[in-house]
Image (cartoon, grey):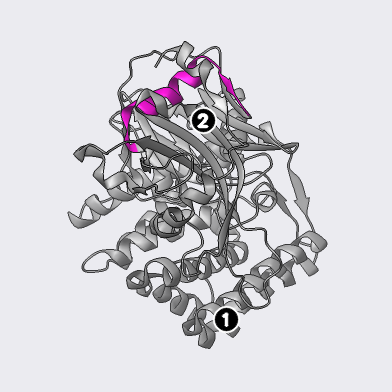
Amino acid sequence: MSEAVIRTATASSGSPGLLASLDPLLRDWLPRQRWFAGKGRPITGFSLVAATELLPARAGLGLHHLLVRAHQPLALGAPPHPGDCYQLFIGVREALPPRLAPALIGHVDEGPLAGHTVYEALHDARPAELLLEAIRTQARIGGLRFERDPHQEIRDGLVPRLTTAEQSNSSIVFGDTFILKLLRRVLPGVNPDLELPLALAREGCPRVPAPTGWLRAELSGDPYVLGVLQPFVQGASDGWELALRELSKGEDFSTEARALGRATAEVHTALARALPTVTLGHAQLHLLVDGMTERLEAATQAVPALRPYAPALHSAFTALADLAAEGRTWTAQRVHGDLHLGQCLRSAAGQWSLIDFEGEPSKPLAERRMPQPPARDIAGMLRSFDYAALSADPPDPGWAETCRAAYCSGYAEVSGVDPRTDPVLLRACETDKAIYEVVYEARHRPDWMAVPMAAIERYATSDLI
């Protein structure tokens, strides 16, 4: 895709009727996407936040970049909410070739695209190539800003492919050289998925691929991060898939778990150097514990199966508050925010990398950027080992315990602090994470509910995790 083609693209935010013509198609298509956050609630309407025509349809292939707010009824008692904003890439053709049939959104009957077929453009090579070329040339199209690190080379001619892994965003791999992660549910503000990898790159931390380029927008004075391009770790194994594979063969995973603990500690150490840390005393811990308690109360309303365990689970949080009341303090810093095996890659050479610093998508952006005890990340990884072991056939809790111990030992080798020496904090963080998992599975994967519920029962009947 040439630079000249990119520079002829125009903003089309004033296109009346574009969203209206897509409305009935999007109401059917959007809830079926893995990354749609409002499942289980009807869509009552859409509003257009921004629209940019990246490729004119008269060329035989059109591409519209849309930021669309989906309006849905709120749960009883929920605070007012304007609706989630989604980033869409709408391809336009007269007819879809068979290879693009899975990307179909629908046929437009009226409006500026009448008579055309629209589809998810990220499945198509030409629109994907345009996005990479726009980053390479640092294009500015309407309100979109394609930017890059000038010290990293981006070759043209890299063949794109959309990844098929289920995730809350969409990713395109370019020639096994780069991976472009496009955020789907977007929020105004500084996004940690770009902020933290850039900070780690400045620190020279090799455990996180340094951003090569990114896509931003400035709307009504608010910054939006829409995508991040990073080097692709060729031949890497996903940590979750690798763990399940070794587990199914009865192979020991403790060496990898220990190495992963060291990698996590290296990232935490670099983040503590790069960004401010804070001390959590009684007042700050009170807020932290209140948040955990509120999430427990909301979870018991959403998932009745949790209610018999609620008093015992709550004790994990009050025990932490009691330590704070006695004068105990903790250090908080920026952390990954949603660490688990699926957020880790092991290269062919055996080196572990951490990816996806977006944090838990369900949390507000400001909350994701707050300093947290490193135990938050550690608890997420320990829960992930437990998840893998309990999802195996047959379940193997002993495998999880071995991995958990090895991971903590590896973390201590780099940080000098073994997470197990602070069992009250670790127990509270693991309990909080397991509660989140129960709610997630109840909403998205009911067949998996038994995995976190087994942990809930164990946490509620034991003194320490």
Residue at 68% x, 45% y is 333
| Neighbourhood count class around disc 1 (C-alpha, 10 Å): few under 14, some 14–19, many 20 upward | few
Number of marks present in the image shown: 2
Nearest to the observer: residue 85 or residue 174: 85
Q: Which mark is residue 53?
A: 2
Residue at 33% x, 15% y is 157
Nearest to the observer: residue 379 or residue 48: 48
| Neighbourhood count class around disc 2 (C-alpha, 10 Å): few under 14, some 14–19, many 20 upward | many
Residue 350 lies, with reference to residue 260, above or below; the image says above
Query: Closer to the camera: disc 2 or disc 1?
Result: 2
How far from the left and from the top, in percent, is residue 445? 37, 67
Res. 259 visible in picture: no
How far from the left and from the top, in percent, is residue 200? 58, 30
How far from the left and from the top, in percent, is residue 391? 30, 65
Q: Is residue 129 magenta?
A: yes
Residue that numbered label 1 is attached to: 301
Residue extent of the magenta highlight: 123-142
**447 to the left or right of 206:** left
Residue at 64% x, 78% y is 76
How far from the left and from the top, in percent, is residue 377? 54, 51
**Alpha-carbon distance for marks 2 and 1?**
44 Å
Task: Answer with the quarter of the image where residue 385 lies.
Answer: bottom left
For the residue labelled by badge 1, is the local secondary structure a helix, a strand or a loop? helix
Question: Looking at the magenta stretch, what is its main secondary structure?
Answer: helix
Q: Is residue 181 magenta?
A: no
Nearest to the observer: residue 312 or residue 186: 186
Res. 12 visible in picture: yes
Q: Which mark is residue 291?
A: none
